[in-house]
Image: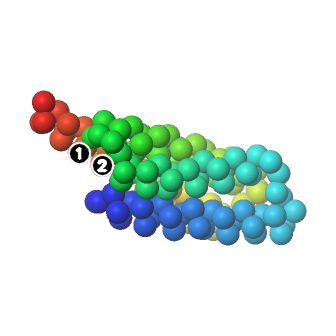
Amino acid sequence: MTSNQLVVLSKAFAVDLIKLFDTLKRRGKAAPIISQMLRSGTSIGANIHEANYASSKADFVNKFQIALKECYETDYWLEIFHDALIITDDEYLEMSGQCRKIRRLLIASIKTAKRNIESDT
């Protein structure tokens, strides 16, 4: 998985999160805590995108690790909103599935990048 593919997936995820946020606002559920999910979810792609311009391999890994942490946080919020009946089963399954896919790819990319750093030394 190249970082460019992660950029595409994370951007699509961010767009879908924004659409979900708009849907929740129309349902009258635009609580400030929902904004937190939007912030963490859109931050995933921002950090992945920023990693493409990292100043070093270590900086690249750091950006991906931040994206991974944001991915875990976003998945947490999705689970909370699902359990609180703020989002539907379908919304949860779709968004959580996308988030998990990105998370798995980030984990694999971080492992590969760390191995590459170790082999350079």
Residue 34 in sight here: yes
Of all residues shown, which one is farthest toward the top?
121
Q: Name which quarter of the figure residue 88 lies in.
A: bottom right
Task: Tell me if residue 56 comes above or below residue 102 in the rendering.
Answer: above
Name the residue carrying label 2.
109
Mark 1 vs 2: CB contact within 8 A: yes
Residue 86 on image: x %, y %:
76, 57
Horizontal placement of 7 versus 43: left or right? left
Label 2 CA crowd tier, 10 Å (few <14, some 14–19, many 20+):
some
- Helix, strand or loop at label 2? It is helix
Name the residue carrying label 1.
112
Q: CA distance from mark 1 to mark 2?
A: 5 Å
- Res. 6 mark: none
Horizontal placement of 68 versus 85: left or right? left
Of all residues shown, which one is farthest toward the front?
55
Amino acid at circle 1: Thr
Quarter of the picture containing the N terminus is bottom left
Task: Name the residue at 44% across, 65% down.
Answer: 9
- Helix, strand or loop at label 1? It is helix
* Frontmost residue, 103 versus 79: 103
Residue 15 on image: x %, y %:
59, 67
Of all residues shown, which one is farthest toward the right?
28
Task: Name the residue at 49% across, 56% down.
Answer: 45
